[in-house]
Amino acid sequence: MKKKILFLLFTFMVGNLYSMEITLQEAIRKGVSENVNVKNEKITQENTEIMKKQAIKTALPKVKLTSSYTKFENPMNPMDKNSDNMYGNKISIEQPIFTGGKILIGIDTADLLGKQGNYLLEKKEKDAELEITKSYITILKLEKNREVLKDSLEQLKETYKMINAQYKLNLITKTPLLEIDYTMTNLDSQLLELEKGIKISKANLKRLIGMANSETIELKDISIKENQEKILNIDEGIKIAKENGTDVKLVKIGTEFQEMNTKLKRADLFPTIAFNFGIENSSTDIEGIKDKWNWSGTIMFSYNLFDFGNSQDEYRKSKNELKISKNSEKNSLEQLEIGIRNSYYELEISKKLIKAKEQALASSKEQYELDKGRHIAGLITTTDFLKSENNLRQSEINLINARLDYYLAEKTYENKIK
């Protein structure tokens, strides 16, 4: 017996040693840093920084070195036995002078990509935060519901003992026992379903926060304060979202990209001018190649004189696409506003539901205590008592879920406006 107690104590200590308690804030902090989408966006930002540098470098001169060797079938000079060989070197510098604004447009586009990358990172971080919160709330719901069912089952076991004692004394029929037994069996089944849900939900949460599925976690409860004063009203929320909201910024930046594309198509209508300076030499003798250097300077002018109006068509098409983008922007902003309003109304409904569920629970408790006494006194049937017990249990679960739904509705609303 002593060995058995020591073994159980050791098992308990080992279990606690490898069990990790975590708060919602810790889960969010850990999850956001481990989120795949966030990690990928940070890598994309690195590429954007490289693209910025590349865009700036297009305005700088390019230096090229070209070395060549040519072998001819017949000597070019019969008097020179080496004239069937030709060695050549050329160093050239090319500098764009005018490109119709393409270089500046490229730099501005790269800057715009950087801004978009920052907004996308913010969005993916806040979306990851909300996803983790939803997962965390789901587990808390299941665990709290499990506790309600366990308490209910314990109460029913006590009732079963009392009814069984009466049955053994032949004071009642077996029907009440069967009714309670069925209810307890049903509760056992619900508990198994909840256990399965908790395991699956915890596995999902561990995936979100970058933990191995073999690790054990215990979730700390959250503090739910129904403080409406801290929550921005609908008009303030929409104003903040329009001024600083990440989703709004991403919608607007899409139009800015289209404006850049229109400018780029317009730049195609202009000529390009570049300057090239080079020094080169050539010789049939590899030793002579060191001495005979000549320089040359070239200004290159290029202009598409005639392409059947294709460049103009591309420009006109890009202007139409800009109009489409602006129309889409307006529609998207309206949809975002509707989404914010909907989240706010859901939050208000959730708050009112808590009050309703609190009243329902108070009523169920009072009725249960009354029916419990009546049942013991034999004034009501077991069926009526079980109905009262079920109402109490469901009222407790409904209130738990309503409070957690309110918390989630609050976080969803905050997510919409930031």
Image (cartoon, helix red, strand yellow):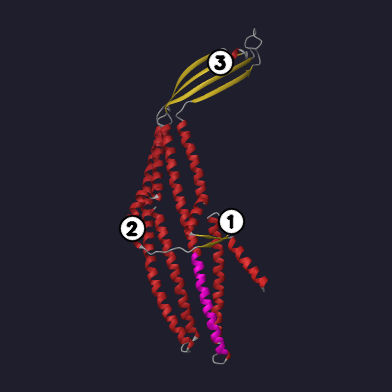
Q: Which residue is at a point 54% across and 14% down the rendered structure image? A: 293
Q: Between residues 114 and 20, which one lies in front from this camera angle?
A: 20
Q: Earlier in the sequence, mark 3 or mark 1?
A: 1
For the residues labelled 2 and 3, the Cα–Cα distance comes to: 76 Å
Q: Amino acid at mark 3?
A: Asn
- Expressed as whole percent of the image width and height from the top left, the position of residue 202 reads 54, 61
Membership of 163 in magenta stretch: yes
Q: Which badge, 2 or 1, is on the more N-terminal residue?
A: 1
Crowd band around label 2 with a 10 angstrom C-alpha radius: few (<14), some (14–19), many (20+): some
Q: From the viewer's perspective, is the residue at label 3 or at label 1 nearer?
A: 1
The residue where tag 1 is placed is 212
Find numbered disc 3 in the image and state the secondary structure of the residue it sits on: strand
| Front-lying residue, 254 or 19 | 19
Residue most extreme to the front: 2
Q: Nearer the viewer, mark 2 or mark 3?
A: 2
Q: How many numbered badges does the structure rendering display?
A: 3
Q: Which mark is residue 281?
A: 3
Question: Residue 106: x percent and y percent?
Answer: 43, 35
Check residue 234 in the rendering and tell me which mark sits there, or answer none: 2
Q: Amino acid at mark 1?
A: Ala
72 versus 396 height, above or below:
above
Q: What residue sits 46% from the left and 74% below the top?
A: 394
Secondary structure of the magenta portion, mostly?
helix
Residue contact between numbered discs 2 and 3, judged by CB atoms under 8 Å: no
Q: Separation of disc 3 and disc 1 at Cα?
A: 66 Å
Q: Which residues are magenta?
A: 140-167
For the point 57% across and 70% down, which residue is it? 192
Q: Which callout, 2 or 1, points to the residue nearer the camera?
A: 1
Taking 159 as reference, is 301 above or below it?
above
Indicate whether 137 appears above or below 300.
below
| Residue 332 horizontal/vertical position (percent) | 38, 51
The reply to whether residue 343 is visible in this rendering is: yes
